[in-house]
Image (cartoon, rainbow, N blue to C red):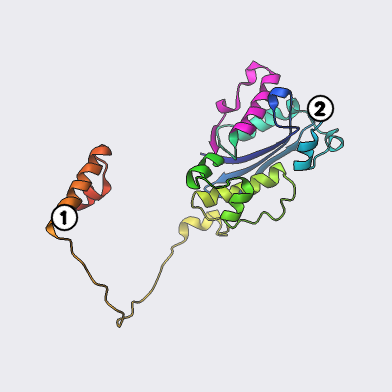
Amino acid sequence: MRQVILDTETTGLEPSKGHKIIEIGCVEIRNRRRSDKTYHQYINPLREIDDGAFDVHGISNEFLADKPKFKDIAKDFIDYIRDCELIIHNAPFDVAFINAELKELGKEWGRIEEFCKITDTLVMARTLHPGQKNNLNALCGRYDIDNSQRDLHGALLDAQILLDVYLAMTGGQTSLSLSEEKQDDVEIKINFQLDENRTRLKTIKPDNDELVAHKDRLASLNQVSDGSCVWLKIETDE
């Protein structure tokens, strides 16, 4: 499935109180690599921006005065994210704002969940790092990702940073520069030689009681996993 990292900036915190989206930034991932197909749009919200929100993103009412309205960009935006896995940090926030904008356009527009699958990286981070800070800055520090340009929030910049965080959290490379076309032709070989004079490791074999306990444990795991215990299958194959 095609993946798209998304972030938004808004006039405030509550769409239920009439707050609106003022910036959308999206970055596409294909085969765990960033593609050149981004989506970035500033939007005229037709309302004032809260002072607190301005302090976060620095986007002014004057800057947005000549920008298109959401209704003018809605089709292009939906076409960009259609049928993708949409990856968002704290997804309920952005999803609520997008759905509020779509609702204003009419019932025929539906909800964003009808166009794509949504994955919340904040939920992922809380599972991986329970009890720790899991905002974007904290994750950048944890995964050694450069966010030095993030003096103010920006939808496209934050989407680009979240892409690196997502790849790091899911075990991906963020700096490998092999081209996609040559990826399948790459063969990695590791050559090494053991030192013949190295100290031999001591081998301790289990006694009969330990072997019985081991088999009982595997049988228990096999039962609770509906017959999917991999270790039991390996021992049977052997």
| Element assignment for label 1 | helix
Image point (50%, 56%), residue name: 183
Q: Earlier in the sequence, mark 1 or mark 2?
A: 2
**What is the magenta segment's predominant secondary structure?**
helix
Q: Amino acid at mark 1?
A: Leu
Quadrant in the rendering for residue 45: top right
Q: Of all residues shown, which one is farthest toward the bottom?
A: 197
Q: Position of residue 23 (x, y in %)?
A: 73, 37
The tag on residue 211 is 1
Question: Label for residue 91?
Answer: none
Q: Is residue 237 magenta?
A: no
Q: For the residue carrying disc 2, how many other residues have a C-alpha within 10 Å: few (<14), some (14-19), or many (20+)? A: few
| Identity of the residue furthest to the top in this view | 107
Location of residue 199 in the rendering, given as x and y in whole percent from the top left corner: 29, 79
Tell me the residue at 30%/81% (across/down): 196
Q: What is the magenta range? A: 92-120
Front residue (pair 27, 236): 236
Q: How many marks?
A: 2
Classify residue 142 as left or right of residue 13: left
Query: In the structure shown, which secondary structural element does the residue marked by tag 2 occupy?
Result: loop
State the residue at coordinates (85%, 38%): 63
User: Marks 1 and 2, Cα distance to the nearest angstrom?
Assistant: 72 Å
Residue 164 pos. (x, y %): 59, 51
Q: Nearer the viewer, residue 193 or 45?
A: 45
Q: Is residue 191 left or right of residue 78?
A: left
Specify whether residue 95 is painted magenta.
yes
Q: Picture coordinates of residue 22 (x, y %)? A: 75, 34
Q: Is residue 134 above or below residue 109?
A: below
Task: Write down the residue under mark 2.
Answer: 47
Q: Residue furthest front?
A: 131
Q: Quadrant of the C terminus?
A: bottom left
Quarter of the image where one finds residue 24: top right
